Image (spheres, grey):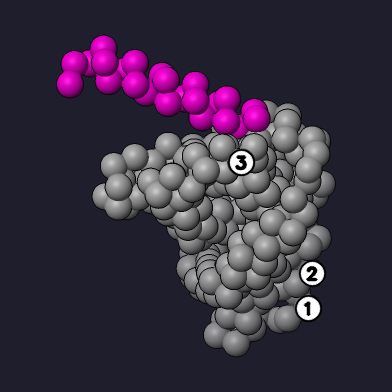
Amino acid sequence: MQIGEFLRQKVLAVQEYSLMSWAAITNIFRRPFYREDVYTQSDLIGVGSLPIVMLTGFFTGGVLALQSATTLAQFGAKAVTGELVSLSMIKELGPVLTGLMVSGRNASGMASELGSMQVTEQIDAMRALGTDPLKKLVTPRLISTVMMLFFLTIVSDALGTLGGGLVSITWLRLDASQYFHMAYQFLMYPDILEGLLKPLVFGFIIATVGCFFGMSTHGGTQGVGRSTTQAVVVSSVLIIATDFFISYLMIGIFGR
């Protein structure tokens, strides 16, 4: 394939993705609303992802406390372990790891489900019956993913701080009141704002990327597998890249 043709296909894919994302957003304010689909997807995405998010957040906070306390002890700053764990979880690790876990679980699920519908011509049948596939299939997943990832990130942050506290108190022999006091004393509004803004953006990326690759699937069952892989890879890379730019923007605005 020539370089010009390759670039043309990539630019066309970005255009199609942008148009689909804009249509999914505008459909939020248009009837019908398909509330039942939103509830179903919220259950699949939110409740279904809760165990893996809880485990990931808890053990991430634990290992963060374990590793950081060892380093901080060399400088006589072991007491600030709680501050380091809470800031790291809320600003960075909580949103990113939760986004990556949900991406691996749900972006692939969306791509495979919609891809199977695409190759079996179910989506074409919906259009023939007068139903907008973007309104019926994409918009409920977008609403559910953004909403559920927001709450899943809060759970991950809380359990990460709790896991760090358990490790600090049990293995590192830190005082419990000191750890939790340091964990919340140095949190400021910009830190919480950054930690709650990221899951909204990450949820949008997961839903739109997963649905885009599912809706653009072709080539039978092999195409479904290819779309599933691409959805996970692209959404994960976009989450990490977007995280950098959001962090850079927040530091530029608030200075931290």
Residue annotated with mark 2: 181
The number of numbered badges drawn on the structure is: 3
Of the pair 60 and 145, the residue shown nearer to us: 145
Q: Which residue is drawn at 35% across and 50% down?
A: 224
Q: Residue 177 carries which label?
A: 1
Residue 122 magenta-drawn? no
**Percent x, y of residue 193:** 76, 45
The answer to which of 136 and 131 lies nearer the viewer is 131
Q: What element carries label 3?
A: loop
Image point 34% across, 16% down: which residue?
Answer: 8
* Range of magenta residues: 1-23
Cα distance in 3D space between marks 2 and 3: 60 Å
On screen, residue 182 versus residue 141, left or right, reads right
Q: Position of residue 252 (x, y in %)?
A: 67, 28
Q: Which residue is drawn at 22% across and 16% down?
A: 3
- The residue that label 3 is drawn on is 129
